[in-house]
Amino acid sequence: MSDGQSTLFDFTDIDTSRGLEEKNGFVSHPFIEPDTVQYRDFQIELSGIAVETNLLVVIPTGLGKTLIALIAAAEMMRRGGKKVLFLAPTKPLAMQHLDSFNRMFMLKSFALFTGSAKPSDRKELWKMKRVIFATPQVIENDLKAGLYDLGGVALCIFDEAHRAVGNYSYVSVAAQCREAGARILGLTASPGSKKAKIEDILVALNIEKVETRERLDEDVNSYVKDVDEDIERVKLSSEMRRMLKPIDELLHEKIVKLQRMGFLRYKKADMISRKDLLSVRASIMGRKKKGGYLFGAMHNSIVAIHAYHCSELLETQGIEPLRLYLSRMQESSEKSKVEKSFISDERMKKVGEILAGTTGISHPKLAKLTDIIDEQMKLKQDSLVMVFTQYRDTIESIVPELEKRGISFARFIGQADRGEKKGMTQKEQKRTIAEFSSGKYRVLVASSIGEEGIDVPDVDLVVFYEPIPSEIRYIQRKGRTGRSSVGRVVILVAEGTRDEAFLRASASRERRMNRIVRSMKGVNQAAE
């Protein structure tokens, strides 16, 4: 590779539409393998900005954030940069980026830094390799231990950059990138809906400029397909409503007691959220004073949290997830006094009696879900479908219904064990995604592990078993479809339940996020 090749491009004298050579629709550059990176003007433009200034890129999932990073890394190397550091929140995601670079980056000098590698090995690899893929905690710990420094790093890439807040390792690593003079590129599909949080991200990453693209933008819309979004509503069964009544009575009683003690007075009792209850518990725990008053407040807050969770489980997930939750608490040999009090409350005993006599389907959503999947398969026999749900226990209530319909499926969950139920190893996760991609399974039933970063194929249908109030997770779920073909999203909502509030919250927060990010687009930030 010679620096005199005609295929070189220099972003310092761009007209971006001509500054990078295109050959047969692909990017041509001495550090990029021929015929591997499709030429897309907006990616070229954004990578060009990234080599000149610290940049936060906000674009929808599926529009090639990794390719923007790769093109920027290639140009930094051509300009004489010694090293590129690519950070991702999880080991599978870091490995995914390494695989992408291995296919498309001409310079094969890579290393993966995770906790499974010995510190002494990482120290030596840092000296030898040019592009380092890592989880941020490992880099943070290595820098603290003095194994190496960031001198010579030309570009530091922060994937899922919305995590760069608080004590997360991105923050301290970014500070050292800044000291070392490294260029910083942050990538995310959804930075959040609060201006203060986005500003915190910009400060933490020393961002000087924000660039965003939306699906309807002129330079992007030709690369994405439409996504049809539908809301499917169901009604709770009479059994479910019978169980909800005593749970909600208990919840209301404990909230009123907390209000009489001076907590939660800023809201009506029936408007209190889980976040409010958790905040009260943290406030009580933070007080040094001890005594009967605070003990009573703590007792009421914990019982209220359990009752709230039971009510939410029943409304949004179904009878079986509630049954499993209460069974684990009942069978635990390490129950706290508060948990014993909760289970022995007459209202919860009544719930247990109703649970013991329940028959039939766990939640009306299940019949609707299988109908939707059947309809999709009739429209397109080789469809790929992703079903997202908040809880693993819900996956176990979904599975029998899919089996009854003869639908081929696979579970996709995290690595952590849940009691006797084992999580999936990274090897199992990778194999499951590969088998789903190949069509061995038509439906992937995933917990939140499937939302962020994992390289799943473009699917025809995404089903939310429940709405989620987080606009970040909402966008990540939705982004699994509508990449290469027209996609569809269906959100299941139980009428008159928390589902309705969560649906409104996520839509409102997404609109607010888009407004805030658009207002920052192309504006140089006052990073100090």
Image: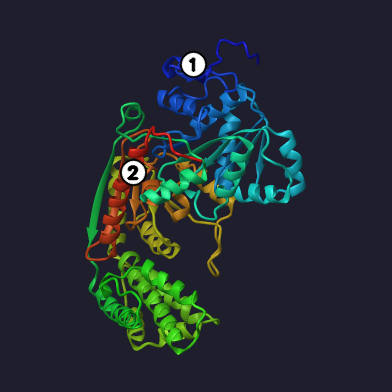
Residue shown at the point (28%, 71%) measured from the top left: 267
For residue 450, above or below residue 79:
below
Q: Residues within 10 Å of mark 1 (few under 14, many from 20)?
A: few
Q: Amino acid at mark 2?
A: Ile
**Disc 2 on helix, strand or loop?**
helix
Whole-percent x, y for residue 255 in the image? 32, 78
Nearer to the camera, 55 or 380:
55
Which label is found at residue 411? Answer: none
For residue 401, above or below residue 179:
below
Nearer to the camera, 443 or 207:
207
Give the Cα distance between marks 2 and 1. 31 Å
The reply to whether discs 2 and 1 touch (Cβ–Cβ < 8 Å) is no
- Residue 160 as seen in the image, left or right of residue 355: right
Whole-percent x, y for residue 19 in the image? 47, 16
Nearer to the camera, 63 or 71:
71
For residue 172, above or below residue 292:
above
Quarter of the picture holding the N terminus: top right
| Residue at which label 1 appears | 13
Whole-percent x, y for residue 68 in the image? 49, 30
| Residue at which label 2 appears | 516
Residue shown at the point (54%, 30%) measured from the top left: 70
- Would you identify the image quadrant in which residue 366 lies? bottom left
